Image (cartoon, rainbow, N blue to C red):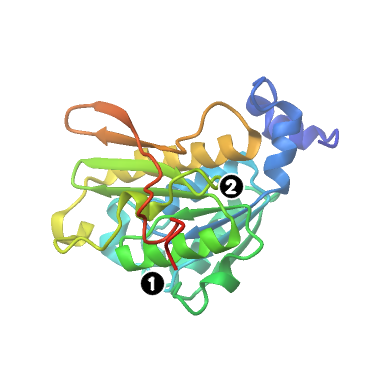
Amino acid sequence: MAVNPDAINRYARHLVLKEIGGPGQQALLQSRVVIVGAGGLGGPAGLYLAAAGVGHITIIDDDKVDASNLQRQVQFISSDIGMDKATIMADTLDDLNPDVTTRGIVQRLNADNAHALLQGADIVIDGVDDFKARFITNDACLRLGLPLVSGALGRFKGQVSVFNTDADAPCYRCLVPDIPPDSETCAAVGVVGALAGVIGSVMALEVIKLITGAGDSLAGRLWLYDGLAAESRTITLPKDAACPACSNNSG
């Protein structure tokens, strides 16, 4: 990293960590992350990644800010209501760290545009609340060879995992092969706002670890958090030989 007093001051707490240091911080500044979904998970993840100095952050979301979002989507304020989430969040991350180049794409990720929108990224974050969109994101990441950091939450529980890190690692559909018939959104079941911050922050941490090579990622593992019990556990998530997306027999 260039000897820049402003940068040294901004990233001082990273620079003293032997797991990150100067080389890790340089890797962060040169990395490209795409966040799919500027909501309860993508918001806190994006805030922490921008603060960490991730050099290029793209946010993809076609939704607008609604008053009901403000209970958990801390990247927005009341005056943002009615504005495009991707645009507002990109502006917020710009204000947070001038070292970060942001891009807000006001589109819904779909099977037709996913390859083009994700191409060029180093890591993709899945912060959506829709299984179809998750499957599309996962499939595009598989084709592009991109690691996928995925989180989910509902009521008082959440989970995080890392997919597609190598040929032997599981993908998202090793965990969820098909769309559950009883799938429910946060709008239907509710969610405590602070939980989004917990899960989104863990997602950001996993991205930072992947970029810098620090520690052990959640690749091949699923981290489960129970906010009511204040307990968490990590379980093994093996690659599924019959996975419809990443097995040798898949299309």
Helix or strand or loop: what does disc 2 sit on? helix
The quarter holding residue 121 reads: bottom right
Residue occupying the point 73% across, 47% down: 30
Q: Does 87 sit left or right of 201 as displayed?
A: right
Q: Does 213 sit left or right of 88 as displayed?
A: right
Q: Is residue 132 above or below residue 210?
A: below
As rendered, which of 38 and 180 lies closer to the eye? 180
Checking the image for residue 209, the label placed there is: none
- Considering every residue shown, the one lying at the far right of the view is 3
Measured Cα–Cα span from mark 2 to mark 1: 21 Å
- Report x, y in % for residue 169: 48, 43
Count of numbered badges drawn on the protein: 2
Crowd band around label 2 with a 10 angstrom C-alpha radius: few (<14), some (14–19), many (20+): many
Residue occupying the point 27% across, 46% down: 193
Q: Does 128 sit left or right of 120 as displayed?
A: left
Residue occupying the point 35% across, 54% down: 242
User: In which quadrant will I find the C terminus?
Assistant: bottom left
The quarter holding residue 33 reads: bottom right
Crowd band around label 1 with a 10 angstrom C-alpha radius: few (<14), some (14–19), many (20+): some
- Report x, y in % for residue 39: 38, 58
User: In which quadrant will I find the N terminus?
Assistant: top right
- Report x, y in % for residue 157: 23, 41
- Report x, y in % for residue 111: 45, 76
As rendered, which of 10 and 145 lies closer to the eye? 145
Residue occupying the point 52% across, 68% down: 87
Helix or strand or loop: what does disc 1 sit on? loop
Instruction: Residue type at mark 1: give it.
Output: Lys
- Considering every residue shown, the one lying at the far front of the view is 249
N-terminal of the pair, mark 2 or mark 1, is 2
- Which residue bears the numbered disc 2? 50
- Which residue bears the numbered disc 1? 64
